[in-house]
Amino acid sequence: MAMDEIIISRAIIERYHEKLMRNLETDVAIVGGGPSGLVAGYFLAKAGKKVVLFERKLSIGGGMWGGGMLFNEIVVQAEAVRILETFGIRCEKYDDYHYTADAIEAVTTMTGEAIRAGLTIFNCISVEDVMMRDEKVEGLVINWSPVEMTGLHVDPLTVRSRFVIDTTGHDTEVVQVVENKMEGRLNTPTGKRLGEKSMWAEKAEADTLSNTKEIFPGLYVAGMAANATAGGPRMGPIFGGMLLSGEKVAAALIDRL
């Protein structure tokens, strides 16, 4: 059979349509394709849960791609090395507590392993709202990122999910939506986002884990989004807390599901 441009187009459209239809209803929807989102998706999928991840950018991996100031090496603390090893990511001991890994290998390996475990990823999709039922988040309102970027008036679509995880990092995109529409109801001391504080790597890594939790009924936060919501500091290019946070939120949801 000769190569045919229309068959190529038809194959892409049909396969994407099938993938989207399969994920209109899921157990868990993750917003943000950084390290915590990928780790959470991996462990949830490995546990047999139906999980989908939406990333607004073309690429997956969040800030991990650039390491520190575009030096594409990352640092993880000793406690998190086991997660790199779970994915088969090579790391090198720097001293008794710090380990380094190639940022590109880390992102690509985590992404591939998460997909093979059963995670479905949609890139170039933004979340503009949540679906709320009886004051519980039960889904997401999604649109193409280029629609958002160009300001076009195009109505979105909706996906249903039993739980949502905000792993959008500093921006806390889903939490912001809920905060704006359910004022004073977040699971924080003030009921609102407290915002991230300045750099303090050691405290930030610990806070990332303690702040990983259900922040509103049906909505969890993990990774830097957890700190930015609960008022923790930023940590810079050390990623162990992100990895451990993704593992923690997955374990919490596996128990609930």
Image (spheres, helix red, strand yellow):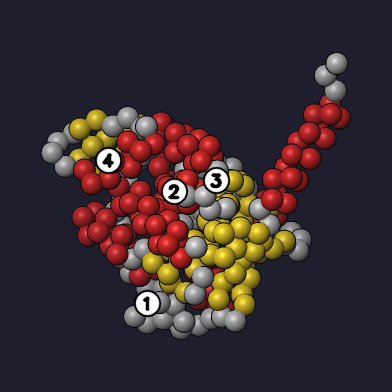
The secondary element bearing badge 2 is classed as helix
Q: Is residue 170 above or below residue 45?
A: below
Q: Which mark is drawn over residue 81?
A: 4
* Image-quadrant location for residue 96: top left
Q: Is residue 14 left or right of residue 164?
A: right
Q: Amino acid at mark 1?
A: Thr
Asked whether the residues under the numbered discs 2 and 3 touch, taking CB atoms below 8 Å apart as contact, a structural biologist would say no
The N terminus - image quarter: top right
The residue wearing badge 1 is 188
The answer to which of marks 1 and 2 sits earlier in the sequence is: 2
Q: Which mark is drawn over residue 43?
A: 2
Q: Nearer the viewer, residue 229 or 19?
A: 19
User: What residue do we see at 78% from left, 33% from top?
Assistant: 11
Q: Residue furthest top?
A: 2
Q: Which mark is drawn over residue 164?
A: none
Q: Give the foreground label among 4 and 2.
A: 2
Q: Spatial distance from mark 4 to mark 2, Cα to Cα?
A: 16 Å
Q: Spatial distance from mark 1 to mark 2, Cα to Cα?
A: 27 Å
Q: Amino acid at mark 2?
A: Phe
Q: Spatial distance from mark 2 to mark 3, Cα to Cα?
A: 9 Å
- Disc 2: CA contacts within 10 A as few (<14), some (14-19) or many (>=20): many
Residue 170 in picture, x, y percent from top left: 42, 59
* Image-quadrant location for residue 251: bottom left
Asked whether the residues under the numbered discs 4 and 2 touch, taking CB atoms below 8 Å apart as contact, a structural biologist would say no
Q: For residue 147, say whether it is visible.
A: yes
Q: Is residue 229 left or right of residue 25?
A: left
- Disc 1: CA contacts within 10 A as few (<14), some (14-19) or many (>=20): some
Q: Amino acid at mark 4?
A: Val
How many numbered marks does the figure carry? 4
Residue 166 in picture, x, y percent from top left: 48, 61
